[in-house]
Image: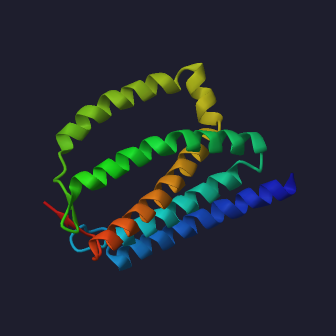
Amino acid sequence: MTGELNMRLISLFLFPMAMIAFILIMTCAGLYKFKGTRLKTRMIYGLALSILFSLFFLCQSGGDIAIIGNGLFLGVILAPLSILYTRRWIEKRLDNGTVYYHRNHRARYWLWFIPFFICLEFLFHSEFGKQLLNAAWPVLGLCFSWVILQVYTLSYIIKLENKLGQPIMEDKK
């Protein structure tokens, strides 16, 4: 019991420190801007961040094999869907070695966010929602699928760069 408590306290201390380090890396590497950044650099950063979140929630599971198994199962189920979407997204925006980001349409995002938030409020006030909030495996599953997605996306971008013979850069339209 004491070892598990110590592990959780250590992870609660290290996680904010790691997040500060990731913010500093993002600032120094210029990942907050889209023009002129290599897509592979952004994907490496995303992979490192996804591994950090996965390790954090893995520590929060307390080593319970049921939580880890359910999370891994959910991650394996969600990963192919996100891989298909991301691959299509890259292919649609790739033009001569540059990935173009379209301007954000904030009104459209708000029109989707408000009904989604209302549905979440109803869900979390139900008994099923309260159980889902107390369970650690859904978040762990999302983190596992994120790691799988980042590994695939990085390997796909490296393959595309080798095919094009140049690095893929980012730009805003």
Q: Residue furthest bottom?
A: 28
Q: Nearer the viewer, residue 115 or 171?
A: 171
Residue 68 screen position, x and y as percent: 70, 45
Residue 42 screen position, x and y as percent: 37, 67
Counting every numbered tag in the picture gives 0
Q: Nearer the viewer, residue 60 or 168?
A: 168
Quadrant in the picture for the C terminus: bottom left
Q: Decide if residue 98 is on the left or right side of residue 20.
A: left
Q: Which residue is rendered at x = 56% and y = 26% of the image?
A: 129
- For residue 115, which quarter of the picture? top left
Q: Which residue is rendered at x = 44% and y = 41% of the image?
A: 81
Residue 172 screen position, x and y as percent: 17, 62
Q: Decide if residue 36 is on the left or right side of residue 149.
A: left
Q: Nearer the viewer, residue 104 or 134?
A: 104
Q: Which residue is rendered at x = 44% and y = 68% of the image?
A: 45
Is residue 136 visible in the rendered structure shown here?
A: no
Q: Residue furthest front?
A: 163
Q: Is residue 137 above or below residue 97?
A: above
Q: Which residue is rendered at x = 49% and y = 63% of the image?
A: 47
